[in-house]
Amino acid sequence: MKLFRSRGRHDAPAVAGSPLDQPVALYKAGRYVAAEAAARAVAESRSTLPDDHAALVAWSVVGLATSAQGRHAEAVAVYDRLLPDFGRVFGAEGVLTLKLRSDRAQELARLGRYTECEAECAAVARIADRGGSPETGFAAAAARNGLAFALTEQGRHEEAEATAREALAAQGGEQDRFTITLLAVLARSLNGQGRHEEALAAAERADALWQALPEGERHSESGAAGMARATALLGLGRTAEARTHAAAAHRARLAVHGPEHRGTADAQALLDRIGPA
């Protein structure tokens, strides 16, 4: 099994022509409730098969879909339950195990457990760097994205910038959804250093990439670039523009992820910080 090698390759693993096709397609389409139900159905239907790969990966899609609905603690519980089996079946340093660890770590950050996220993402990146394959390279970059976010939330913005730039360089110029995420976290680190013009440039680049995605592939990154852009504009004293972009980011995240998601809450907090018109 491999990670997606398309624009959505960092979202969920899949097997072509497998029982996972439907839940993965639903997840990529942003239909997270349906994706969770479909993935649970696959996992439960194969529960009597020992060490069934499709069942294990289906449970990981449950974790992703649960997270996308804002149920972050529940997603961590899913990943905690899966990790021993992933390590045993796919190998402790297998790419699917590393991805699961990275996904779990980034849920920890959404729960405010930043030091735990930092330690786990750093460990995953170190292991993945040894892999030498495109798939492990992607896993390393994904872990560095989580690491950069955790560092910004601890006020360590220069370290976060260096980490985000390293992950972007590893992308090799690819213009995909993951690049949007990395540019957004880079902008976040620059905003944290008061380098708002540079942050705005990174956010505008992320927004241009997001706008270029097909409509059906924009869901998971909804609002990411807008949040970074609004923060930069606020730092530059362009309050009215900042409010417009923050409101749009909040609407997008609310529509895609619902009110309980960490990203939606962050957008609301930024709106509150900007204040009314």
Image (cartoon, rainbow, N blue to C red):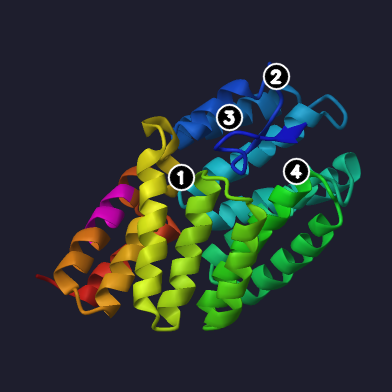
The three-letter amino acid code for the residue at tag 1 is Ser
Q: Residue at x 77, y 60 (%)?
A: 124
Per the image, the residue denoted by label 1 is 220
Q: Residue at x 21, y 79 (%)?
A: 237
Q: Nearer the viewer, residue 212 or 76?
A: 212
Q: Residue at x 44, y 68 (%)?
A: 187
| Label 1: which secondary element | helix
Q: Which mark is residue 135?
A: 4
Q: CA distance from mark 4 to mark 1?
A: 20 Å
The number of callouts visible is 4
Does 104 appear above or below 214?
Answer: below
Q: Earlier in the sequence, mark 2 or mark 4?
A: 2
Look at the image and give the residue range highlighted in magenta. Answer: 247-252
- The answer to whether marks 2 and 4 mark residues whose Cβ atoms lie closer than 8 Å is no
Mark 3: which secondary structure?
helix
Specify few, some or many for label 3: CA neighbours under 10 Å numbering under 14, 14-19, or 20 or more. many
Q: Does 122 appear above or below 60?
A: below
Q: Which residue is mark 2?
A: 18
Which numbered disc flags the more N-terminal residue, 1 or 2? 2
- For the question of whether residue 214 can be seen, the reply is yes
Q: Is residue 258 left or right of residue 152?
A: left
Q: Which residue is mark 3?
A: 24
Q: Is residue 227 magenta?
A: no
Separation (CA) of disc 2 from disc 4: 20 Å
Residue type at tag 2: Ser
Name the quadrant containing residue 266: bottom left
Residue found farthest to the top:
17
SS at mark 2 in the image: loop
Whichever of labels 3 and 2 marks the residue nearer the N terminus, that label is: 2
Look at discs 2 and 4 and give the one toward the viewer: 4
